[in-house]
Every structure is written in C-alpha cells, then in structure tokens.
C-alpha cells in the first residue's frame, strides 16, 4: 500500500503533540512531516493541564509521569483552587478525579463540606501534602503503586520538545521552512502550500498548528466567532518567579491558585524549578499600566520585576469550522479560551483525538469530562488502514469541536457569575448575570450535554463552592443505574431521561442503588486513607522518577486502572 502524506504546520506544543500522536498511530501507513520555521516564535501556551493528558500520552505510547515530571520539569496538579471567588476568605476547588460524592448526596444526607471535598481522593492527597506515588518499601502491599487522579504543571516548551523528539525518533521528519501561501480550491480544500523560497509542498492531509497565525482558516477566508459577550477579559500580564520557600509553596501549588483581583484574577502555577504566574484582566475595567501595578502589589515587595512581565493580548473566540476537506486545525489556530480551567492543551489534544476517533471507528469521543482521566477511546493500537474522511465526519467534527469550545466558555463564565464577593465593579457586573448562568447550569445538572468537556460533575463543583444549595434544577438527581428490569424500556425510549429512570425505580431498587453508590465512596475513602500514610510527600514526588523504571508494564497498567476498577 502506498503511503499517504500528512503535513503538520507548526512545531509548538500543538505541532509537537500532533507529530507524536500521528506518527505513533499512523506512522506505518502515512509519512508525517512537520514544517516549522525557527524564525516563527513559539507561544508555548499552557503550563497547567487536565487529567486527560495522561490518556493522550498513553495513546502516544510514552510514560506521562516520566514525560511531564522529568522531561518537562513539571509537578503534580490535583485541582484548581478558586480563592476568594464566592466571597472573601473562602476557597473552593475543581479537582481532577474519577468518582466522588454527588451533589445530591451532599444535601440529601447533610454531609459536611470538608467531607465532600475530601471525597475527591486526588484533592485529598494534595490537601494532606502527599504525592500520588507509593513509597517503594510498600510496593508489596495491596495498595496501588500510584493513585492516578492527577494532571501536571509543565514547562510547555520542554514538553513540546520532548514530543517532537519522540516523533522524529519514530520516523517523522522536520523541515525548517516558512510557509508563504496556502492554495485553496473548491472552497475549503488545500491544493498545495508555497514556501518562502517559492517551492511547492503537496500532501494528502494537513494539520494546522500555526498558532495565532491561523494559516488555513485565513486562507479559507474564515472569521473566528467572538465569544466574549459576557467575559470581557482580553489581557494578561505574565512572568516567572523563584520560590521563596519551596518546601511550603510547592505543596500549596499542587492546586493551581486562582486569586481574585479587582478586574480579573491572578494565577500561580508551581513547576519543579520555578513558579509561573500572571494576571488575567479586562481593559474595560482597568488600564494595562494599573493592572501591572496591582499585580506587582499583590506579591511581597520586590518579588515581581516589571521588566520581566510580558503583556499577552487575546480574544475569546473560535472557528465554527475547525476542519475541511483535507485538513483540521489544532491549538490556537482553532481558537482561544482564557486559562482559568487549564484547557489550552486539552483543546489541541481533544481535536486530534476526535479526528482519530472519527477516522478509526466513525464515532466521536464520549464523556470526555474535565474530571475524567480516561477518554476518547482511541486505544494503544496503530491504525493500519488509511482513513475515510468525508462530509458527514467533517460536519460531526465541526459541531463537536465548536460545542466543546462554547460549553467551556459557558462553564468558565459560571465561575464569575455565581460570585457574591462585591470586590469591585468588575465582580458586581458579573454577578448581574447570575440568572443567565443558572439556566446554563441546569442542562448539565439534568444530565444533558454529558458528552462534552464540562458536564454535571464539573457544574456540581461550582454549585458546592458557591453555596447554591437547591437553587439550580437537577441538584437532586443522583447517580443513575439502569436496572435489568428497566433496560428494555430504556433501550426502546419509553424511559427517555435520567429523571425518568430514577422515578421508575422501586423503593427496593432505590435503596440498592444508594448502597452501591455510597459503598463505592467508602471503599475509595478507606483505601485512600491508607494510601496517604504510605505515599511520598509532594516535595518528594521526583523520587518516583528513580524507581518508575523498576515497574513492569503490567504493574503500570494495574496502577493506572486501580481507581477506575474500584468504581466499576
């Protein structure tokens, strides 16, 4: 079979991710070539990731922990920490995890908030200052060798370099060239590329990872859809600072700190050797100069050097068409959402995985949630037949990727709209949108749009964090189990919704479902309590890199699936 040719435009985080994944999955049937000019600066977007990065790197057949903690000089991330968002001196979290107490459990059984947050066992590890890695002297116990409910903070430039190196080692080629023109025919089909030296490049498929240059969308004449009607944030000051007391700061920053400011919020992301930090704000409420001064004043005197601060200008926007006849976009070329929930790297990986899922099995990803750690369903095996990419799949892809952007923007907006902190005009104006975002929250809370990135589990966290009680419809919907008696009615559509299923339960079935659900919670709680006693401290997380190689592939698979197996 003659090999097809795929061109990846750009060598930043998105381009490197595309090269590594596609060389791994399609390398036997496609020639993968990366076109990336050293003259074009790399944005290197994203230092914080979400849990799906583990699934992505597993699909690339590389070890996530070695890559992120070692090569990318990263750290473990358990959660986002929303500090003073609801009100002053109040914190809540959006943890990474697989299973925890339901919103309905919290109110129906009147459980304390501390118990709710610690039911997210990954977050519990962070709050106790523990890494997710078992000390080697306890490997002979029945505990898992790692408790995989976490993501990472990474140096995005080092991360991209590692993935690019792996892609090239496996057979991809990299050319230092600059693209001058993208020739489009038949509305959205790429005929060929023209390089700066006048030469022509042909291929069967193209992946646009050109960042804000957005070469293919611009060539097609597309205009991104602005999605900032409510969220006026359009600037960020960003810099890097040293640790003052790493022993104290690193455990604290295992949950990304997002601290409210007068016209936005400040982030702190703890990496292995430094802290990444910045201030996201809106120029409708504060000038760039005043924002910089507020940002400097928010730290100890002298910690922020204004000369080291970079101003980033952005729009919240994305393209409704992120794929065409023989191309897809990936990363910033597809769109941009502010960094509150660490979604930039997720978006690029999700676009790649959605495309692979469609060409491999003609279906879209399912249940790719913020809190999820397994996703996409692409698997580890290579794809050994050339893909079929047609109008039907293009339409599905474009709707799915656009909906993922929009649902993410709505979820981020809910963080702001539910506030009652009265901190400034910026926050008071956001609070006037509360009813609108309650209506938005009702869909996922009622189990609608559960295939998208932020669904019921994600919104539940916001409702708990903002003390919203029974204010949002769907708060009372518990975990849904389809009993054998109900299966036929559910399959036929007689029982259409989750509420229909719950109402159809007998009292005996209701009690059985509650026992099953609460039993899983207790099982995880008791197991994680013991794990905490035998895990490395967060500051010692890198000891894992020295012993990781002593694990067999079977050990690794068992450890990766341990938490998931607890809740099956």
Image (cartoon, helix red, strand yellow):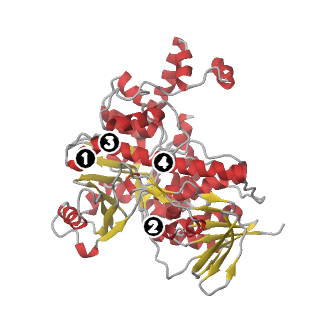
Task: For label 2, count other residues whose C-alpha is less than 10 Å away and answer few (under 14), some (14-19) or many (20+).
Answer: many
Q: Nearer the viewer, mark 3 or mark 2?
A: 3
Residue topped by disc 2: 156
Residue topped by disc 1: 427
Under circle 2, the secondary element is helix
Distance from the alpha carbon under mark 3 to that under mark 1: 8 Å
**Percent position of residue 114, x then y:** 31, 35
Q: Nearer the viewer, mark 1 or mark 2?
A: 1
Quadrant showing the N terminus: bottom right
Distance from the alpha carbon under mark 1 to that under mark 2: 31 Å
Task: For label 3, count other residues whose C-alpha is less than 10 Å away and answer few (under 14), some (14-19) or many (20+).
Answer: many
Residue found at the very far top of the displayed protein: 507
User: Is tag 3's residue or tag 2's residue first in the polypeptide sequence?
Assistant: 2
Distance from the alpha carbon under mark 4 to that under mark 3: 16 Å
Is residue 30 visible in the rendered image? The answer is: yes
User: Is tag 4's residue or tag 1's residue first in the polypeptide sequence?
Assistant: 4
Task: For label 4, count other residues whose C-alpha is less than 10 Å away and answer few (under 14), some (14-19) or many (20+).
Answer: some
Under circle 3, the secondary element is helix
Q: Are marks 3 and 1 in contact (CB under 8 Å)?
A: no
Asked whether 196 or 88 is in front, the reply is 196
Residue topped by disc 4: 406
Asked whether 319 or 63 is in front, the reply is 319
Residue topped by disc 3: 417
User: Is tag 3's residue or tag 1's residue first in the polypeptide sequence?
Assistant: 3
């Amino acid at each position: 079979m003659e090999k097809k040719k795929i061109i990846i435009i750009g060598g930043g985080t998105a381009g490197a991710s595309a090269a590594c994944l596609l060389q791994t999955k399609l390398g036997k049937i496609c020639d993968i070539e990366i076109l990336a000019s050293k003259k074009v600066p790399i944005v290197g977007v994203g230092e914080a990731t979400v849990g799906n990065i583990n699934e992505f790197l597993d699909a690339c057949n590389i070890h996530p922990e070695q890559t992120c903690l070692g090569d990318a000089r990263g750290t473990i991330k358990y959660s986002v920490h929303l500090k003073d968002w609801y009100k002053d001196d109040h914190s809540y979290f959006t943890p990474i995890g697989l299973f925890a107490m339901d919103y309905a459990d919290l109110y129906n059984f009147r459980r304390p908030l501390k118990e709710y947050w610690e039911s997210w066992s990954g977050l519990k590890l962070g709050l106790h200052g523990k890494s997710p890695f078992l000390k080697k002297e306890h490997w002979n116990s029945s505990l898992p060798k790692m408790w995989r409910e976490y993501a990472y903070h990474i140096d995005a430039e080092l991360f991209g370099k590692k993935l690019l190196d792996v892609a090239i080692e496996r057979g991809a080629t990299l050319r230092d060239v600059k693209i001058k023109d993208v020739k489009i025919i038949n509305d959205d089909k790429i005929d060929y590329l023209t390089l700066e030296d006048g030469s022509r490049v042909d291929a069967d498929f193209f992946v646009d990872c050109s960042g804000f240059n957005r070469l293919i969308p611009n060539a097609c004449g597309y205009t991104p859809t602005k999605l900032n009607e409510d969220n006026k944030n359009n600037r960020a000051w960003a810099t890097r600072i040293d640790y003052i007391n790493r022993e104290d700061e690193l455990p604290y920053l295992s949950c990304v700190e997002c601290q409210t400011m007068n016209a936005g919020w400040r982030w702190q992301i703890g990496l292995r050797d430094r802290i990444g930090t910045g201030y996201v704000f809106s120029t409708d409420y504060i000038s760039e100069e005043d924002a910089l001064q507020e940002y400097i004043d928010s730290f100890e005197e002298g910690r922020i050097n204004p000369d080291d601060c970079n101003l980033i200008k952005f729009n919240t926007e994305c393209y409704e068409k992120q794929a065409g006849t023989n191309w897809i976009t990936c990363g910033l070329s597809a769109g941009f959402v502010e960094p509150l929930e660490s979604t930039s790297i997720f978006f690029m990986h999700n676009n790649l995985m959605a495309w692979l899922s469609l060409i491999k099995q003609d279906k879209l990803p399912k249940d790719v949630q913020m809190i999820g750690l397994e996703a996409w369903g692409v698997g580890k095996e290579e794809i050994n037949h050339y893909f079929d990419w047609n109008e039907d799949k293009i339409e599905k892809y474009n709707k799915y990727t656009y909906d993922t952007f929009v649902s993410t923007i709505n979820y981020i907006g809910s963080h702001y709209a539910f506030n009652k902190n009265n901190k400034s005009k910026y926050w008071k104006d956001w609070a006037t949108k509360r009813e609108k975002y309650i209506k938005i929250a009702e869909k996922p809370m009622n189990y609608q749009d559960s295939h998208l990135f932020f669904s019921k589990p994600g919104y539940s966290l916001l409702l708990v964090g903002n003390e919203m009680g029974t204010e949002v419809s769907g708060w009372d919907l518990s975990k849904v189990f389809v009993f054998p008696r109900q299966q036929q009615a559910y399959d036929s559509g007689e029982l259409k919704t989750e509420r229909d299923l719950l109402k159809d339960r007998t009292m005996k079935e209701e009690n059985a479902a509650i026992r099953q659900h609460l039993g899983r919670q207790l099982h995880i709680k008791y197991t994680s309590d013991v794990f905490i006693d035998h895990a490395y401290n967060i500051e010692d997380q890198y000891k894992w890199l020295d012993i990781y190689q002593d694990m067999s592939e079977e050990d690794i698979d068992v450890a990766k699936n341990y938490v998931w197996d607890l809740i099956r």
